[in-house]
Amino acid sequence: MRLGFIGLGNMGKPMAVNLRRAGYKLTVYDVRREAANELVDQGASWENSPKEIAKKTEVVLTSLPGPLEVEQVAVGRDGILAGATRGSIYIDLSTNSPMSIRRIANIAKGKGVEVLDAPVSGGTLAAKAGTLTVMVGGEKEAFDRCSKVFEAIASNIFYVGDIGSGNMVKLINNMMEFINLYGSLEGLLLAKKLGLELKTVFEAIKASGGDSFIFRQKLPRSVLIGNFEPGFALKWAYKDIDLGTQLARQAGVPLFLASFVQQKFLEAKTRGWGDKDWTCFVLPMEEVLNVRLRY
Ligand code: NAD
């Protein structure tokens, strides 16, 4: 099976590398040509547009910032659907709007192309290790045809329902993850202000009820060592919580904590920190209390 991969950023590049390692012939594209250098050196082919990639491949994958870029790449003039052949499959790995990917899937159906929305979780470390979690929406038959593709990038693979369901689960996950980290930071800031030894507090909580995946995995690589290189850029985390709260508004579901954390992200983004790691929203909290959450 020949694969196309579009969007070679923090997540897309390691996923594409793992697909090559799994033995797939890969054709790649990114608006930043240099993003493809490493893959091309490893033997991947380059094409000048998503349309050209789709003409030559059976399955095209995208890992793009969000709804705007996905729409452009999927249904734009030189987009995937302009080149895709009947019977091919388009998999969007981005965290995207469920409504938007549904519209794209409808257009694709008219051309005999199946679409799967398959956002991923686990961050850049899991993307490199090929141990992501992927939540897939779309036709079950198309999902089954792509099982080996998903196995090359993920160790936890969930088929969650029709098209758009993958992103619904992902947006809910991210809201929970962000709220969870906000709560963890409040707790650690209090510990610091009380004069407790941060490393010991961190280890004690890691072995107690306040522990969580994001607490133990993320904090030691970001806030606690003062590293705000993205990982996962704040502007994309804001995009995710914005899509999540939009989804809830449309469903008539009030989300008190998610709305609050969205404002904390907006505060940090307004300071000009959109390209920093999303955990940088702790910086104004530290500023107010005049403490630093560093080991
Ligand atoms: P990124 O900004 O590092 O990568 C995005 C890539 O898309 C870049 O290489 C960019 O040049 C390319 N791109 C943008 N517009 C394009 C276009 N029109 N045509 C072709 N290429 C284009 O972002 P990322 O962190 O890799 O995230 C990608 C997606 O994965 C996002 O939807 C994000 O929400 C999601 N995600 C990220 C993480 C993470 O930890 N970084 C984790 C899970 C999910």
Image: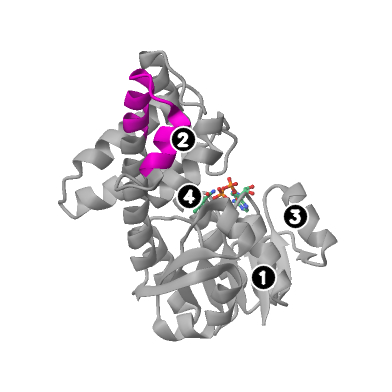
Q: Earlier in the sequence, mark 2 or mark 4?
A: 4
Q: Give residue 267's quadrant in the image.
A: top left
Q: Which residue is mark 4?
A: 68
Instruction: Please provide percent x and percent y for residue 272.
Output: 50, 24
Q: Nearer the viewer, mark 2 or mark 4?
A: 2
Report, in whole angstroms, how far the alpha carbon at label 1 lies from the one at label 2.
Answer: 29 Å
Q: Which residue is mark 3?
A: 36
Whether residue 213 sits left or right of residue 130 in the image: it is: left
Q: Are marks 3 and 4 in contact (CB under 8 Å)?
A: no
Q: Give residue 255's quadrant in the image.
A: top left
The image's colouring method is one colour
Looking at the rendered structure, the kind of residue marked 3 is: Ala
Report, in whole angstroms, how far the alpha carbon at label 2 lies from the one at label 4.
Answer: 24 Å
Looking at the rendered structure, the kind of residue marked 2 is: Thr
Task: Say few, some or many: other residues with alpha carbon within 10 Å of mark 4 (under 14 / 14 to 19 / 20 or more).
Answer: few
Q: Nearer the viewer, mark 1 or mark 4?
A: 1
Residue 279 — which label?
A: 2
Q: Earlier in the sequence, mark 1 or mark 2?
A: 1
